[in-house]
Image (cartoon, rainbow, N blue to C red):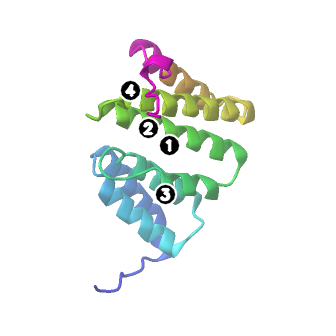
């Protein structure tokens, strides 16, 4: 494999604009690649970290798991940002499960959405004045749970071990 070519630090703002465009075009793998190039040039770039997290969660249900996005959450500066984006990761995983064909995905989705709501509640308590993003996301999760009539697994649905 050929060695990847680095981008210059001066090119970072324009590269991040391209990330936004690729996300809008539903090309998350292209956006992810650019984020990784930006982070090679500036490993702590907060905007690139958030954009990478978002491009990865855009790919939930298409072979991308939650481990790397959750690792990125831990690299974010600020308690609010970590709580809010943990909620984003959980919410998007819950939604991906709802779109998937797997049996029992609604039960799994419920768990992820409830975890998202807990993260959004933490973010709400830490939010800057005038920022109700966590409330908006909490409400979106609550509507999905209500409209899809999702709930925890009942005792009848839990398989009992064979003795």
Q: Do the residues labelled 1 and 4 touch (CB within 8 Å)?
A: no
- Mark 2 lies on residue: 92
Q: Earlier in the sequence, mark 1 or mark 3?
A: 3
Residue 54 place in picture, x, y as percent: 45, 48
Q: What element carries label 3?
A: helix
Residue visible at 46% across and 33% down in the picture: 161
- Evaluate whether residue 154 shows in this view: no
Q: Which of marks 2 and 3 is nearer the N terminus?
A: 3
Tell us which disc is closer to us: 3 or 4: 4
Q: Do the residues labelled 1 and 3 touch (CB within 8 Å)?
A: no
Q: How many marks?
A: 4
**Of 155 and 77, which appears nearest the observer?**
155
Q: What element carries label 4?
A: helix
Q: What element carries label 2?
A: helix
| 143 horizontally vs 25: left or right | right
Q: What element carries label 1?
A: helix
Tell us which disc is closer to us: 1 or 4: 4
Dot 2: within a 10 Å radius of its alpha carbon, few (fewer than 14), some, or many (20 or more) residues? many
Segment colored magenta: 144-163
Alpha carbon separation for disc pair 2 and 3: 14 Å
Alpha carbon separation for disc pair 2 and 4: 13 Å
Residue 112 place in picture, x, y as percent: 50, 34
Magenta stretch secondary structure, dominant? loop
User: Can you tell which quarter of the image residue 31 is in?
Assistant: bottom left
- Mark 1 lies on residue: 89
- Mark 3 lies on residue: 68
Q: In this view, does 84 lie above or below 98?
A: below
Q: Are marks 2 and 1 in contact (CB under 8 Å)?
A: yes
């Amino acid at each position: 494999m050929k060695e990847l070519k680095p981008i210059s630090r001066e090119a970072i703002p324009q590269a991040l604009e391209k990330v936004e465009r690729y996300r809008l075009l539903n090309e998350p793998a292209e956006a992810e690649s650019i984020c990784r190039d930006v982070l090679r040039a500036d490993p702590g770039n907060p905007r690139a970290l958030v954009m990478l997290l978002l491009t990865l969660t855009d790919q939930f249900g298409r072979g991308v798991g939650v481990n790397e996005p959750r690792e990125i959450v831990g690299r974010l500066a600020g308690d609010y940002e970590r709580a809010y984006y943990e909620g984003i990761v959980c919410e998007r995983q819950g939604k991906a499960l709802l779109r998937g064909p797997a049996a029992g995905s609604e039960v799994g989705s419920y768990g992820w959405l409830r975890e998202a709501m807990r993260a959004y509640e933490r973010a709400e308590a830490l939010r800057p004045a005038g920022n109700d993003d966590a409330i908006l996301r909490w409400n979106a999760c609550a509507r999905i749970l209500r409209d899809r009539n999702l709930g925890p697994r009942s005792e009848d649905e839990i398989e009992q071990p064979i003795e």
